[in-house]
Image (cartoon, rainbow, N blue to C red):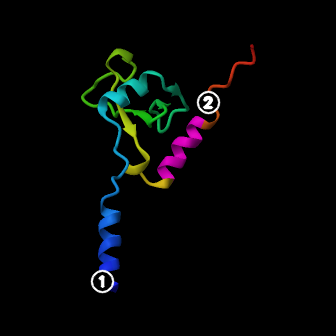
């Protein structure tokens, strides 16, 4: 009897799907509406509804200021430590857009 309850509990938990990670298309749309935050380690940072975004490292003598050719990396909570996510939250805390006072 006890084994049966454990088996049922284990299979019931296994059938609950994990929250799926956003698709690349969803992240691209999210980045387009993200707002700018303070830089982290000299790299631009944005906050969207799905993730934080950070400017990718630049290699091979590329210019990091070429906005038309800038690559970004999505920073998802499930892929990073709480400390990393806190660093991004702090970078975006003072830069968050405010609600308009005009009604």
* Residue highlighted by disc 1: 3
Dot 1, how many residues are within 10 Å of its Cα: few (below 14), some (14-19), or many (20+)?
A: few
Question: Which badge, 1 or 2, comes first in the chain's sequence?
Answer: 1
Which quarter of the figure has residue 69?
A: top left
Q: Nearer the viewer, mark 1 or mark 2?
A: 1
User: Please, which residue is most extreme toward the front here?
Assistant: 1
Q: Residue at x 67, y 25 (%)?
A: 98
Is residue 84 found inside the magenta-colored segment of the image? yes
Front residue of 81 and 48? 48
Q: Residue at x 34, y 43 (%)?
A: 21
Front residue of 60 and 39? 39
Counting from the top left corner in percent of width and height, residue 3 is at 30, 83
Counting from the top left corner in percent of width and height, residue 103 is at 75, 14
Q: Is residue 59 left or right of residue 27?
A: left
Q: Give the prevailing secondary structure in the magenta stretch.
A: helix
Which image quarter is the N terminus in? bottom left
Q: How many marks?
A: 2
- Tell me if residue 64 comes above or below residue 92 in the rendering: above
Q: Residue at x 54, y 48 (%)?
A: 86
Magenta residues, start to end: 83-92
Counting from the top left corner in percent of width and height, residue 102 is at 74, 13
Secondary structure beneath dot 2 equals loop
* Residue contact at pointers 1 and 2, CB within 8 angstroms: no
Residue 16: give its label. none
Is residue 98 found inside the magenta-colored segment of the image? no
Residue 95: give its label. 2
Counting from the top left corner in percent of width and height, residue 29 is at 39, 24
């Amino acid at each position: 009897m006890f084994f049966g309850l454990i088996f049922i509990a284990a299979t019931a938990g296994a059938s609950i799907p994990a929250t799926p990670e956003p698709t690349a298309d969803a992240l691209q749309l999210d980045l387009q509406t993200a707002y700018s935050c303070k830089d982290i380690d000299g790299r631009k940072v944005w906050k969207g509804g799905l993730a934080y975004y950070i400017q990718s490292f630049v290699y091979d003598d590329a210019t990091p200021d070429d906005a038309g050719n800038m690559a970004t990396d999505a920073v998802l909570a499930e892929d990073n430590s709480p400390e990393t996510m806190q660093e991004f939250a702090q970078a975006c805390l003072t830069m968050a857009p405010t609600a308009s006072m005009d009604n």
